[in-house]
Amino acid sequence: MTIKISVIGTGYLGATHAAAMAELGYDVVGVEVDPRRLASLQKGTLPFYEPGLDEVLMSNIGNGRLRFTDDAAEAAAWADVQFVCVGTPQEAGSNRADLSYLFSAIDALAGSIKQGALIVGKSTIPVGTTAVLKARFLEAAPDRTDVHFAWNPEFLREGFALEDTLHPDRVVIGVDDQESETALRQVYAPMITEGIPFIVTDITTAELVKVAANSFLATKISFINAMAEVCEAAGGDVTTLAEAIGHDARIGNRFLHAGVGFGGGCLPKDIRAFAARAEEIGAGEAVAFLGEVDAINLRRRDRMVQLTRELIGDDLTGRKLTVLGATFKPDSDDIRDAPSLAVARLLHQAGAQVTVHDPKGIPNAERYAPELSYEASLPAALDGAEVVLHLTEWREYRSVDPSELAALVASPNLIDGRNVLDLEAWKAAGWTVRAPGRTA
Ligand SMILES: NC(=O)c1ccc[n+]([C@@H]2O[C@H](COP(=O)([O-])OP(=O)(O)OC[C@H]3O[C@@H](n4cnc5c(N)ncnc54)[C@H](O)[C@@H]3O)[C@@H](O)[C@H]2O)c1
């Protein structure tokens, strides 16, 4: 009999997981509380941009394996395995994770969950959260000791979400009984057969794996950005430095790109929540360095403003600037904590007239930062600019002709905040260029 799966919370993580589970052949229901997202998913339209996901969503709605609802009770009573994929954003006024969406999801399950069902958390959470959720569940439904809890952290990258979900680097499950392990081995049988590492551990370790992985990645990015600061002071070139150290296989060159730093809905809030939780459990000193990782990252945003001033002078009042990129990374429309938008806002606060261009992120950015101007056409966005700041590395920005662009702007000044453009070609086309960690 086909396993019945519910996916509670169908944002970037949940919608991908629901579609991927249906693609593997399971019967899946996605539960969503946001009426706009729900209506869109029910029509088979993705409410966000993720390459390749819309086709899989549509085909599995079409073949009847995938549906979406706001009826949490019906889904809870129907599914054998209930994946919880709701958001865990940074709590207002603190560095901790806001667990209120998780609490609502668990409360909704407690009323009607199927006999013997397995609740599997996939959201990123502070260590110890599963125990809190289980206690909350049993307080609401004291006689439901038949229900199992497990944690199964998710490592997907936006822009590659479907591929990462169907063919992950590894699957990690945290369980405290054999039934949960057996059920999850069944769900992930296609991955196990494919030879993908399947790591079975206790719930505490599984909870920690995700925040440890994100902390490592954030540290690697901030390490090379710290080297960029040193290069700026000493007159070196961080891109060559990164290439040179990256050839050492123990270091590796991935995630070793100096630039405007990391952002998005995961890394910044995850390292802060990890540090806050470590403090609570008496291990604050062990991860105190994450505060520095965060600080280095945020300083890179100020550096973009500094470079702008180096190009056109300190007074930015009324100066026309163009920011290329609104999303936190290419191939996504996610603007959560995007460094590009943060820099655009800093420039705006300094009095500049900022126009932002982005291939996919403008509708989200307009809602988040309505004080900025937006242009969907690249030539219109560049018209009259005194400085162009390249802050999200969309492929289309790499393939432009710098000579053609030079004719559109008022002054050909470029800041390559991602260190990916061919600066020699831009210079040859008449541009004055600056980039973090590199001397002019
Ligand atoms: N986005 C990623 O790349 C990614 C990768 C790995 C892990 N994560 C983690 O996954 C979690 C979700 O992230 P996301 O980016 O998908 O967030 P998101 O905000 O895009 O999606 C969360 C969804 O859950 C819905 N929701 C909230 N409460 C609900 C409830 N009680 N019942 C049903 N639906 C509910 C919201 O309306 C929203 O659509 C976070 O913990 C995040 O850290 C995200």
Image (cartoon, helix red, strand yellow):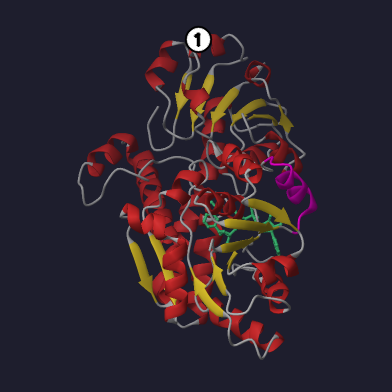
Mark 1 and ligand 1: say if the CB distance to the nearest ligand atom is below 8 Å: no
**Viewer-nearest residue: 350 or 153:** 153
**In the displayed structure image, the side of residue 300 where residue 95 appears, left or right:** right
Q: Amino acid at mark 1?
A: Ser
* Range of magenta residues: 33-45
Left/right placement of residue 389 relative to residue 290 reads right
Queried whether the magenta region covers residue 42, the answer comes back as yes
Report the residue that reaches farthest toward the right. 35
| Residue drawn at x 64%, y 16% as measured from the top left | 379
Q: Mark 1 sits on what residue?
A: 403
- Residue drawn at (55%, 44%) of the image: 302
In the rendering, at what x and y percent does residue 202 appear?
40, 78
The foreground one among 278 and 29 is: 29
- Residue at figure coordinates x 65%, y 68% from the top left: 98
- Is residue 291 visible to the viewer in this orientation of the structure? yes
Q: Residue furthest front?
A: 1
Residue 274: image location, x then y, percent: 50, 69
The x, y position of residue 276, in whole percent, is 53, 72
Locate residue 371: give its quadrant: top right
Crowding at mark 1 (Cα within 10 Å: few <14, some 14-19, many 20+): some
